[in-house]
Image: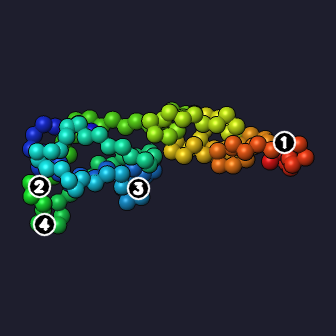
Amino acid sequence: MFFQSFHTSVFLGFSVYVSNSTNKEDGVLCFRDKNYTTATIPNPVNITCPYHGRYVTYYNNRTHPPYPFGYSSSTLIGLCEVEVYGCSDGQYGYNCVENCSVTCRESDNCDKITGHCIGGCRAGWTGDMCKTGWEGNMCQNGK
């Protein structure tokens, strides 16, 4: 996130949520600033979030004084740019360096965090990541 370059005290204490709806209460907290000061808040701020969703919500308020030292009495959304990155189809994990299993029913469709096969496994394979294969007389209905 890139902040506008003026009074950083209005940005202190912000939070970032990820959700599948426009309501932040439906989401999960990815980051809450409790440590930055006007002298230490970076610009840009880089946040790594282990969650995925459709919406990213930037939230900041001043409802319960007294505020920590350096905080302004009001907030301002002065974001110049927000960049959100996620894994491409067929990849998962930290920095998206892992490939979904080719034994997933849809090898380009796995959970972007865990790598678990979303659509199940191809015939003859089982497990969350479809890495356990069955062969011979042990096969029953493709499992």
Asked if residue 64 is positioned above or below residue 137 in the image, the reply reads below
Coordinates of residue 106 in the picture (x, y in percent): 66, 37
Mark 4 or mark 3: name the one nearer the start of the chain: 3
Coordinates of residue 77 in the picture (x, y in percent): 20, 46
Q: Which residue is mark 4?
A: 65
Mark 2 or mark 4: name the one nearer the start of the chain: 4
Mark 2 or mark 3: name the one nearer the start of the chain: 3
Q: Residue at x 29, y 48 (%)?
A: 58
Answer few, some or many: residues within 10 Å of disc 1's Cα (few below 14, many 20 plus, some between 14 and 19). Answer: few
Which element carries disc 2, helix, strand or loop?
A: loop
Which callout, 2 or 1, points to the residue nearer the camera? 1
Which element carries disc 4, helix, strand or loop?
A: loop
Distance from Cα at disc 2 to Cα at disc 1: 64 Å
Coordinates of residue 98 in the picture (x, y in percent): 54, 35
Q: Residue at x 65, y 49 (%)?
A: 128
Q: Disc 2 residue type?
A: Tyr
Q: Which residue is mark 3?
A: 27
Quarter placement of the N terminus: top left
Which callout, 2 or 3, points to the residue nearer the camera? 2
Asked if residue 42 is positioned above or below residue 63 in the image, the reply reads above
Answer few, some or many: residues within 10 Å of disc 2's Cα (few below 14, many 20 plus, some between 14 and 19). Answer: some
Which callout, 4 or 1, points to the residue nearer the camera? 1
Q: Residue at x 36, y 51 (%)?
A: 30
Q: Disc 1 residue type?
A: Glu
| Viewer-nearest residue: 32 or 40 | 40
Which callout, 1 or 3, points to the residue nearer the camera? 1
Residue 71, label in figure: 2
Q: Which residue is mark 1?
A: 135
Distance from Cα at disc 1 to Cα at disc 3: 43 Å
Which element carries disc 3, helix, strand or loop?
A: loop
Mark 1 or mark 3: name the one nearer the start of the chain: 3
